[in-house]
Amino acid sequence: MTVNGHDRTFHIVKCGQVQWTRMIDIGSEFSGAKVVVDENAQPATTQSVRIRNVGGFSGMYSQGGDGNADMSMTGDKFTVSGTANGYQTDKPSEPATATFKIVVTC
């Protein structure tokens, strides 16, 4: 996972699925990300990405809101990249935007 050029490797990945919605939890509740994918859409789309304290950034992308996310899926490997809005953890009162790339296998 990369946020604003800061690479971070997580060894904890939890994947779940309810009907056509896949939820991917990466890392812990203190640092990591949660990705929600709509696999019923053609092609599959990212519904949301929530980033928690990675590279000093916390924030999210949500489909239909600010930011953007592109996704590709090959088998059980997901690649999601885009921009998210939130804040730098050292300046939580100032809005910030971050670029991100998440590559994960479920």
Image (cartoon, rainbow, N blue to C red):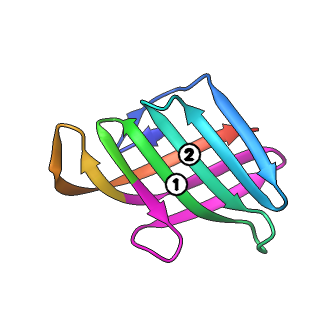
Mark 1: amino acid: Val
In this picture, residue 50 sits left or right of residue 26: left
Q: Secondary structure at mark 2?
A: strand
If the image is split into quadrants, where does the C terminus sit? Answer: top right
In this picture, residue 66 sits left or right of residue 74: left
| In the rendered image, the vertical position of residue 89 relative to residue 84, given as above or below | above
Q: Residue at x 81, y 69 (%)?
A: 40
Counting residues from the start of the chain, the first of labels 1 and 2 encountered is 2
Q: Which mark is residue 87?
A: none
Q: Position of residue 43 (x, y in %)?
A: 76, 71
What residue range appears in magenta?
60-84
Chief secondary structure of the magenta portion:
strand
Q: Secondary structure at mark 1?
A: strand
| In the rendered image, the vertical position of residue 41 relative to residue 85, given as above or below | below
Residue 72 seen from this side? yes
Mark 2: amino acid: Lys
Mark 1, residues whose alpha carbon is within 10 Å: few (<14), some, or many (≥20)? many
Residue 1 seen from this side? no
Image quadrant where residue 18 sits: bottom right
Q: Position of residue 59 (x, y in %)?
A: 37, 52
Residue pointed to by mark 2 = 34
Residue pointed to by mark 1 = 49
- Is 73 within the magenta? yes
Q: Residue at x 51, y 48 (%)?
A: 101
